[in-house]
Image (cartoon, rainbow, N blue to C red):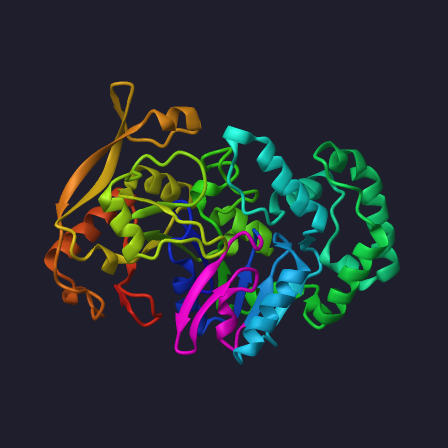
Amino acid sequence: MPVTAVVGGHWGDEGKGKVINLLARDADLVIRGHGGANAGHTVVNEQGRFAVHLIPAGIFNPRALCIIGPGVAVHPGLLVAELDELGAREIDTAGLRVSTAAHLVMPYHQSLDRAEDEAREERRLGTTGRGIGPTYVDKARRVGLRVGDMLNPAMFREKLRFVLDRKYHELAAVGVARPEADAMADEYLRLAERLEPYITETQPLVDEAVARGRQVVLEGAHATLLDLDHGTYPYVTSSNCTVAGLLQGSGIGPRRLTRAIGVYKAYCSRVGEGPFPTELFDATGDRIREIGHEYGTTTGRPRRCGWFDAVAGRHASRINAFDGIALTRLDLLTGFPELRVCVAYELDGAQIDYFPSQVETLDRCQPIYETFAGWEEPVTGARGWADLPPNAQAYVRRLEVLLEAPVQLIGVGEAREEIVQL
């Protein structure tokens, strides 16, 4: 399968880092195609436990080339800090490449991000404040600065002054003083000196790998229900985090894709605001959060937890045309006497089996559950289908039907090797 895309099927935090880390062992190229440091992947391998935010999770394979693609919003200071952290733990980052076409997150983007979300008051989105949304706004307005601009100091300074002249009133409206252009330019150009060995035109590298049939893994960030077009808008991220968006941000044509893997947890979680039909507000939800250590990789915020939502999950599966499912954290459900899966919604007294596009409608939806018997047997040591308890097998098989795609990987622990491959 030369080109494999890995995309989240719910609201993120599904364990994509584990799946990508597994696939990256045999990859020649791993590409991060969208998002920024507002997303994080947790990787647990023989070298330890790591949280990566901008650098692709494939970096732990020293034979793979890892690309931060054109669709990513890059804060150079955070990228340097991440490189330093990995270097301090003796992780080889020589294989990293950063696209000249990726857009830069600037300090004023972070100021705008925080100020705008605070101004929403009760309608706050709960952003990370990392400046990703305003960066993409400037990209669409065609006043963004790109990574490649830093390689020409004089041009970078000129472009930055041009942008700040036009953003003065926007910044003043939210109480942000006009930044000093030269000081900001000096800071970014110092960072550029550190990053220069990694910055390059990445499209030729991608084109060559695809043409030669190399193993390419496309690393999705966030998840489908946070997508700008297909998620719970406006409680979404600022990029397109479907398979289609990942291909666009990586520079690979859709006909080159050979496999799309949807990653789902065996239950659901969500960080931040927005509708969540199966959210649990009881001791069961608290138990899931504590057992699963459900706290954001990037923010540390406690995640909202609930039962598996197959209506939302099927919505993602159809949009992305998943060839297979990676179901993670099945081990976390061990010991629950009863499990539930949402198979439809009740909306104003009627049953529906689709995922509404309007959050006001979704807020009125009540989950209709199917109930499953739980299991007491530990599954962490399972490496084959027959090793799973019968009740766990029944749970997985029902999810396959509801998601309309076969389960191909089952995560039964944090470590890369703790997985059942079907």
| Towards the viewer: 192 or 297 | 297
Left or right: residue 85 compared with residue 279: right
Rendered position, 19 above or below 358 = below
Q: Position of residue 37 (x, y in %)?
A: 57, 55
Membership of 37 in magenta stretch: yes
Residue located at (43% from left, 45% from top): 271
Q: Position of residue 410 (x, y in %)?
A: 28, 61
Please report the bounds of the magenta region as a residue range. Answer: 36-64
| Towards the viewer: 65 or 116 | 116
Residue 189 shows in this picture: yes
Residue located at (70% from left, 50% from top): 107
Rendered position, 56 above or below 13 = below
Quarter of the image with the N terminus in it: bottom left
Rendered position, 262 above or below 229 = below
Quadrant of the image occupied by residue 151: bottom right
Residue 207 shows in this picture: no
| Residue found at the very far bottom of the displayed protein | 90
Left or right: residue 84 compared with residue 307: right
Residue located at (37% from left, 38% from top): 315
Membership of 34 in magenta stretch: no
Quarter of the image with the C terminus in it: bottom left
Q: Position of residue 182 (x, y in %)?
A: 85, 55
Quadrant of the image occupied by residue 190: bottom right
| Towards the viewer: 93 or 286 | 286
Q: Position of residue 285 (x, y in %)?
A: 27, 45
